[in-house]
Image (tube, grey):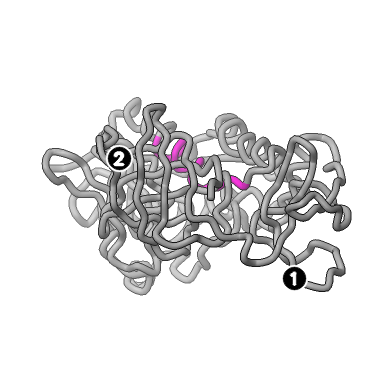
Amino acid sequence: MVRNVLVAMSGGVDSSVAAKLLLDAGDNCFGCTMKLYANEDAGISRGHTCCSLDDVEDARSVAFRLGIPYQVFNFSDDFREKVIGNFVDSYCRGITPNPCIECNKHMKFDKLHLRAKTLGYDYVATGHYARISQENGKYVLKKALDPSKDQSYVLYAMDQEQLAHTLFPLGELSKQETRKIAEESGFINADKPDSQDICFVPDGDYARVIELRTGKKAEPGNFVDSKGNILGRHQGIIRYTIGQHRGLGLHLPDKHYVTEIRAKDNTVVLGPYEELFRKEIRVGAFHWIAGEAPAKPVPCKVKIRYRQPEQPAFIYPEADGGARIVFSEPQRAATPGQAAVAYDGDTVLGGGVITELMQ
């Protein structure tokens, strides 16, 4: 059966190869690039950033070579509100967000799915390294076969409806295989480097973007220890995250790490390495991909950072939709605003944003 597929093409090699694989399989493909922000939103000059003219032209070139229609969709207003706005607000509240997860949640698997439906396309395809299958009447999100490229962590918020209408053609490929296909296909972006930074903060200067968006400088405050003793002055809570020890600007006899950020009194708490470890955290709204929370505690493995290996834990669902997560061993630098994602083998059970560090 021929599938009608709207292919999200970023201008990178992964989404380009995804389009080719679908076309080779006989699908009817329409390529598109989401224009998510103007460089002025981040105070940067034109260059090699996500959504740049160069990226659009690379995507257009691949679409032309494949012989498929192509269009740019302007979602910048929604991106500014849902992703950049959340990013800025979170840092101002002492929380460290993951904008890539928010972008997937609100842009690729919400706005783009709605656009696909409007245009008469049944599926959205992306260049993510992950897999989708069906088990016992449910759609299941699984890790990519190549563990070094697996991106299932940033996809945990997908629901059954989205999984039913999404395709991940690269889920069983390695990056090397993807690049080989691009080279053999003569794609202009076959050797294009992977993007590493947050797209709207390509230079890594989060504070500059936040100050640009808020229109005010971050307010300095006190560094304190766990007992409240003042250790020095910080340059604004937006410049720090839990686990950080570089760039504090202090000369202390022992190495200190950021262990807590208190936005209410504009205080950053520092402590020794051992104070970074927590065995229990809380997620305010845990999203179960199967569609409903289990009635009993769930033994599984959980990761609290993108590159962290999963760690044994139990999840205790709560009546308000949240969950307590208790690890077998204390975990380093669990951070409010980051995602805790649960796995059963290579299957993603679900996840949510860390809201509280408990013990």
Q: Taken as a whole, is the magenta stretch helix, strand or loop?
A: helix
The residue sitting at 26% across, 59% down in the picture is: 345
Q: Is residue 265 left or right of residue 152?
A: right
Residue 19: percent from the left, percent from the top? 33, 53
Quarter containing the N terminus? top left
Neighbour tally class for label 1: few under 14, some 14-19, many 20 plus, Cα within 10 Å: few
Q: Magenta stretch: give its range.
A: 96-109
For the residue marked with disc 2, what is the amino acid?
A: Ile
Whole-percent x, y for residue 304 in the image: 47, 55
Which residue does the image show at 28% across and 47% down from the upper left?
298
Of badges 1 and 2, the one in the foreground is 1
Q: Which mark is residue 255?
A: 1
Distance between mark 1 and mark 2 Cα atoms:
41 Å
Res 250 → quadrant? bottom right
Residue depicted at 16% across the width and 45% down the height: 134
* Residue at x 64% of width, y 39% of height: 90
Percent x, y of residue 352: 44, 42
Is 97 inside the magenta-drawn segment? yes
